């Protein structure tokens, strides 16, 4: 799992990089730390306002370094690599974080009827090999890969925290929800600390956690959806203490897991807001790999999640409570519901 495919494929394990810039604040004697840490080929950005913010940031990045070794697709310590190499042979005992992530990914696969699928690695690997050559794989190659992507052949053993891929050649790729997981992982660690506010950004998922009176963080809690040429579509609001997943489909390779070919969608972008990043990340993917109707139905069935979709026809569709998160939109985009 080398990062999220929304940001491209990274095949090497990068050395974590840590950059801190610390400035003092006038009240509560905290500091503001700005931290960038490379994990799984992507950069986590953190802005933290707290007592000893630099120390907390260093501790967090140390925890991320430990986590990276378990989640990477390569390396001697990679549990994901062990699971994939043992496909069709035997179960692999994994650490708690990875077991939770696999378990949650299978729940989301069942809920979405396979539109989101953590076992799609063989198919993405096939297309990854062709994507820079300007050619497409043959129908036979696609069909062969599709035979290996059935998430129902992933077995979990809760008592021993073991994962088993039933058929040889199967492989896990949790990249479509790893952005949300990394942000949730960081937020959980930070919530154990005394802080005023934080901004977390990793891949296509962000989180804004603010305590009362935290002006330094609240200014970041108004993210924007923009067109490919950076023209404003709409501005979001009320994103504090929520996870936000945003996907721009035209910038990504997203496959239709029933026919095995790249998705054709008229979506310009989709945003899902909710209490956890893993679910928000998966739901955003469902809007793209499935369709708007299916995505909206799943969102409506999940408490505390909302969605906003923008089509290339400049139409904005909202889930039932989506209007609560919409501050304003550009006049040349039409709000199709929620107003």
Image: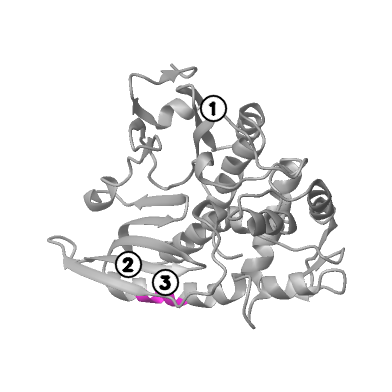
The residue under label 2 is 35
Check disc 2: other Cα within 10 Å, few if <14, some if 14-19, many if 20+: many
Q: Secondary structure at mark 1?
A: loop
> Label 1 to label 3, Cα distance in Å?
35 Å
Q: Is residue 237 left or right of residue 294?
A: left
Residue contact at pointers 2 and 3, CB within 8 angstroms: yes
Residue 26 sits inside the magenta stretch:
no
Percent of width and height locating residue 298: 65, 34
Between label 2 and label 3, give the one nearer the viewer.
Answer: 2
Asked if 181 appears above or below 279 in the picture, the reply is below
At horizontal 82% and vertical 73% (from top left) the residue drawn is 91
Q: Position of residue 37 (x, y in %)?
A: 40, 69
Q: Which residues are magenta?
A: 58-62
Do labels 2 and 1 touch, CB within 8 Å?
Answer: no
Q: Residue furthest front?
A: 134
Q: CA distance from mark 2 to mark 3?
A: 10 Å
In the picture, measured across the screen, residue 197 lies left or right of residue 259, that is left
Percent across and percent down for residue 231 are 33, 33
Instruction: Kindly identify which residue carries mark 3.
Output: 60
């Amino acid at each position: 799992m080398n990062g999220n495919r929304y940001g491209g494929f990274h095949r090497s394990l990068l050395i974590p990089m840590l950059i801190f810039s610390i400035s003092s604040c006038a009240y509560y004697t905290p500091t503001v730390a700005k931290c960038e840490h490379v994990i799984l080929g992507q950069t986590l950005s953190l802005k933290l306002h707290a007592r000893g913010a630099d120390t907390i940031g260093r501790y967090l990045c140390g925890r991320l370094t430990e986590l990276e070794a378990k989640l990477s697709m390569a390396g001697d310590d990679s549990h994901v690599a062990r699971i994939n190499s043992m496909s069709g042979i035997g179960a692999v005992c994994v650490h708690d974080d990875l077991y939770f992530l696999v378990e949650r990914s299978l729940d989301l696969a069942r809920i979405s009827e396979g539109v989101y699928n953590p076992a799609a690695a063989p198919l993405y690997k096939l297309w990854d090999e062709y994507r820079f050559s300007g050619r497409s794989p043959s129908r036979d190659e696609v069909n062969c890969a599709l035979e290996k992507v059935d998430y129902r052949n992933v077995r979990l053993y809760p008592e021993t925290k073991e994962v088993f891929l039933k058929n040889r050649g199967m492989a896990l790729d949790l990249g479509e929800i790893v952005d949300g997981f990394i942000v949730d992982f960081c937020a959980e660690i930070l919530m154990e600390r005394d802080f005023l506010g934080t901004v977390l950004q990793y891949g296509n998922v962000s989180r804004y956690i603010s305590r009362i009176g935290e002006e330094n963080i609240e200014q970041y809690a108004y993210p924007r959806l923009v067109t490919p040429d950076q023209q404003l579509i709409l501005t979001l609001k009320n994103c504090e203490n929520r996870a936000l997943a945003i996907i721009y489909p035209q910038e990504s390779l997203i496959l239709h897991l029933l026919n095995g070919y790249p998705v054709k969608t008229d979506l310009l972008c989709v945003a899902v807001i909710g209490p956890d990043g893993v679910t928000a990340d998966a739901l955003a993917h469902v809007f793209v790999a499935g369709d708007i109707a299916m995505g909206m139905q799943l969102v409506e069935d999940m408490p505390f999640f909302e969605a906003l979709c923008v089509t290339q026809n400049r139409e904005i569709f909202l889930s039932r409570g989506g209007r609560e998160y919409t501050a304003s939109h550009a006049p040349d985009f039409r709000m199709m519901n929620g107003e």
